[in-house]
Amino acid sequence: MGILDRFRRPSAQLSPAPPQEPPLTHFIDAWRRILVGDKRSWVVFRHGTCVVLTSPADDLRAQAIDLMREWGPVYAGSPAGDFTVLTLRHDSGRAIVSHHADIFTYVSPEEIPVDDRTEVVVGLFGRNKRDQDAAELVVIHIEDKRGAA
């Protein structure tokens, strides 16, 4: 037995590395891939929730925050707790659709362990991220397409 062996845990007790939280730019890049060609403005929040603004107001940030404040919180057992998981064509992540037609949350594959990537787990995880975004209301990006031709 080597000198360090008494400090080492047996390999069977080693836990797998926890899922990693992607950098904030990851969410912005993901929504750019997903919404490519879309002429609507959109706003991304810290945990990956995107609000697509179908009728943009003068202040996109304030408009998105107002929508998240009203439609983002999760209330289990109500439509605010419902979700749909979308598999994306050109992206390995998933989009979680909320009870509001213009609020979506991106779940990156890196955020959930491979063995737990069932539709229910991914959906609940995304729903929780939306709830966090609704509570914190931290905007990380605004994609203003009002002047786009």
Image: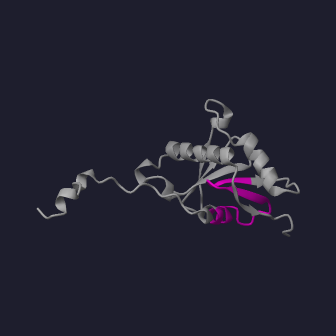
Q: Which residue occupies the foreground of this view, 6 or 148? A: 6
- Left or right: residue 52 versus residue 19 is right
Q: Is residue 34 magenta?
A: yes
Q: Which x, y percent locates residue 84?
A: 61, 44
Q: Is residue 38 magenta?
A: yes
At x 53% / y 47%, what residue is drawn? 122
Instruction: Name which residue lies at 47% across and 50% down.
Output: 117
**For the magenta stretch, what is the residue range?**
28-51
Q: Residue furthest right?
A: 58
Q: Residue furthest front?
A: 3
Q: Is residue 90 visible?
A: no
Farthest residue in the left direction?
1
In-image side of 18 versus 81 (left or right):
left
Query: Residue at coordinates 38% horizontally, 57% vertically from top-left?
Result: 17
Left or right, 124 with respect to 117, comes to right
- Expressed as whole percent of the image width and height from the top left, the position of residue 107 reads 57, 54
Q: Residue at x 64, y 55 (%)?
A: 46
The answer to whether residue 33 shows anywhere in this view is yes
